Amino acid sequence: MNLFDILPLLRGWSYKTTQSEWKPFDRGAAPQIIFAISEPLENGWLMSVDVSALDCMVKMDLDTPGMHMIGTIDEMMQSGLFMPPPEGPFIALYSRPNPASTAGFYSIHPINSAYPIPYNTYVVIKLSLTNDSTQTSTKVKYNIYRIIIDDKQDFYASLREFNQKSGLGVK
């Protein structure tokens, strides 16, 4: 049993999403911060992050207290992340019709809901289009799903109640 299984039984939390439309990215431009929490005002879990791009040279820099991942979609593909693992990042779609071009349709999931990433200090996600792209620009869209603890006291009280009633000892 994991956190996602018992959340409906707990209080003091909410589900938040950050979704984008297709955004332009120019080759060689400075990375754009697409999501950032830099103050310890929000506690929660990154439940899922997915990024769709029209170029395999889109580079992602994902930095959390428990994980720092940097790489292009193409590098992820070459490192063997094309099969969905039970946890961790994977490429959901890699469609590169012309091997001489970096254009295509790509979808990556650097975080999946089977193993959410907890945070209480910072999360920064940046995207850019590297100079290795055969295109001068591309478009990217993303979805970020997270669980926020809105009321710590109520959340932990309901977790203690769950532990007492269930006998499962979830921590």
Image: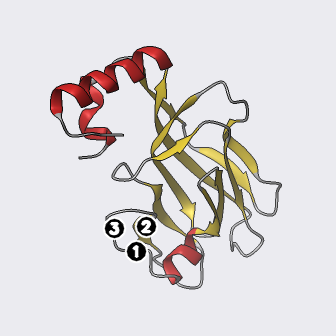
Instruction: Name the colour scheme.
Output: secondary structure
- Left or right: 113 as drawn, with respect to 51: left
Q: State the residue position of label 1.
A: 82
Question: Which mark is on residue 91?
Answer: 2
What residue appears at the point 33 percent right and 67 percent down from the top-left corner? 84
User: Marks 2 and 3: which is nearer the front?
Assistant: 3
Determine whether label 1 and label 2 are within 8 Å by CB: yes
> At label 1, which amino acid type do we have?
Phe
> At label 2, which amino acid type do we have?
Ile
Distance between mark 2 and mark 3 Cα atoms: 7 Å
- Left or right: 55 as drawn, with respect to 8: right
> At label 3, which amino acid type do we have?
Pro
Locate the C terminus and report the quarter of the image it occupies. top left
Q: State the residue position of label 3.
A: 84
What residue appears at the point 40 percent right and 21 percent down from the top-left corner? 155
Q: Earlier in the sequence, mark 1 or mark 2?
A: 1
What residue appears at the point 32 percent right and 20 percent down from the top-left corner? 158
Horizontal and vertical percent position of residue 143: 48, 41
Query: Considering the numbered disc 3 on the image, is that residue within a helix, a strand or a loop?
Result: loop
Quarter of the view holding residue 154: top left
Horizontal and vertical percent position of residue 38: 73, 35
Question: Which mark is on residue 68?
Answer: none
Q: How many marks?
A: 3
Determine whether label 1 and label 3 are within 8 Å by CB: no
Horizontal and vertical percent position of residue 64: 63, 50
Mark 3 packing: few (<14 Cα in 10 Å), some, or many (20+)? few
Query: Considering the numbered disc 1 on the image, is that residue within a helix, a strand or a loop?
Result: loop
Distance between mark 1 and mark 3 Cα atoms: 7 Å
Q: Is residue 52 above or below residue 42?
A: below
Mark 1 packing: few (<14 Cα in 10 Å), some, or many (20+)? some
